[in-house]
Amino acid sequence: MAIWKQILLIIGLGAILIAAAGRFAPQTWPYLQNAGLLAPLQSLGIAPITDDAPKSEKKAADSSRGGRGGKGGGPIAVIAVAPVPAIINDKLTAIGTGQALRSVAIRPEVSGRLIGLHVSAGDFVAPQTVIANLDREATEIALDRARLLVDDAQTKLTRLEQLQKSGAATNLQMKDANLALQNALLGQRQAEFDLSRRAIIAPIGGYVGLIGAEVGDQVTASTELLWLEDRSSLLVEFRVPERLVSQIEIGSDVQLRPLAHPNETIAGTITAIDNRVDEASRTLRVQAMLGNGQDRLRSGMAFEIMLSFSGETAPSVDPLAIQWGSSGSYVWVVRDGKAARVSVQILQRNAEAVLIRAEFQDGDLVVTEGVQNLRPGSDVAPKDPLGKASEAAAPSAPNERPKS
């Protein structure tokens, strides 16, 4: 019994595969025809009848359907709707890397020993906040010496001014005293400046990164103490192909998806566009900005950038209307109450519609259901999806009288 069940299962699967090939794989029709299976499939309405099928097969299929669509039968009932104009959307997906709105590497301006560190990793600091201090005893001594020199120069100048009133001081002496005072003042300013550089100050507001030194370390101007980042917003740089250069504008909206959070989409804005196309890759550098108010994103994170561009207008049809034959894709249309086959070129597939290029005429209705019973010239009674007769329904026969 087990063997017979397996045989029946194999036969059933084979029948399903043959039926599926006849319905959805036109390239298999020549093999089915050689095996004598195409005509039975067409007679059962599984495989559609095309102009490429032999006349004998068409007649056999028509006779098995009772001659519908011919002289001996009534019009074929189908669901048909008019093609709807739609805009072809040109979509671009790119990968970019985020970076903080502003980022600064904090280094000492002068060499010295680190005696104070006032921040920790992850702290937020305001602009002009003192982050760390270097030893300052030598610069304080230099500043005290400079102040003494200023006082001495000022005292000498005052005494010469009094002597000049009595004629005991010459103009040359007064000039030398003024020059000495100015030099002393400059020396004091230099000492004050040197002392100010012993304090390391935050140039921007932002978050403190990992700290690369400890109190007591000897540091120089090349020592990187930490990174300070303002990540209230992130900048994401990416590239677009040169064919889209004319459609990219500053201020355009983009959608960004962090690869670390694939279910989250963030709105952004294009803020900068490069002034030239890279000759090697034929791409243009573009920069977009996105908000980071909750501070969930970090510099260096990867983002998927999605842009949409409006293209040309084309007719759209239901995906069920698209049929395939040996000559390519086509749709059935109702034209003056008759079925006609129109070749189409598929431009774009969307979730609910297919945008095509086809030579439609005014009043054409595209058949979405009932295509398996159609052949060119068949009488058709179209209805819309709600079951109402379409405007392009077949005209009444000349001798038919309206019912009372």
Image (spheres, rainbow, N blue to C red):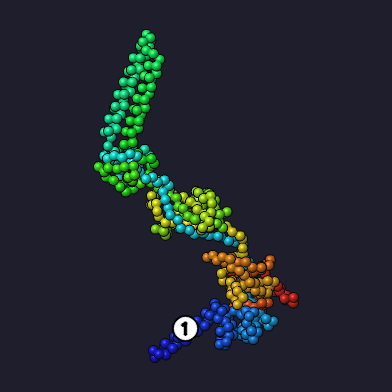
Count of marks overlaid on the render: 1
Q: Which residue lies furthest to the left in this view?
A: 216
- Dividing the picture into quarters, in which one does residue 346 lie? bottom right
Q: Quadrant of the C terminus?
A: bottom right
Is 264 on the left or on the right of 383, as rendered? Answer: left
Which residue is located at x 38 percent, y 45 percent? 104
Which residue is located at x 29 percent, y 27 percent? 144
Q: In this picture, is 260 found above or below 113?
A: below
**Residue type, numbered disc 1:** Leu
Callout 1: 10 Å neighbours few (<14), some, many (20+)?
Answer: few
Question: What residue is shown with label 1?
Answer: 13
The picture places residue 147, in percent across and down from the top left corner, at 31, 25
Q: 262 and 270: which one is in front?
A: 270
Q: 400 and 24: which one is in front?
A: 24
Could you say whether the residue bearing mark 1 is in a helix, strand or loop?
helix
Q: In this picture, is 86 found above or below 44?
A: above
Which residue is located at x 57 percent, y 80 percent? 47
Question: Is any part of residue 63 visible from this angle?
Answer: no
Q: Quadrant of the N terminus?
A: bottom left
Q: 58 and 166: which one is in front?
A: 166
Question: Is any part of residue 263 visible from this angle?
Answer: yes
The picture places residue 324, in percent across and down from the top left corner, at 58, 75
- Dividing the picture into quarters, in which one does residue 143 lie? top left
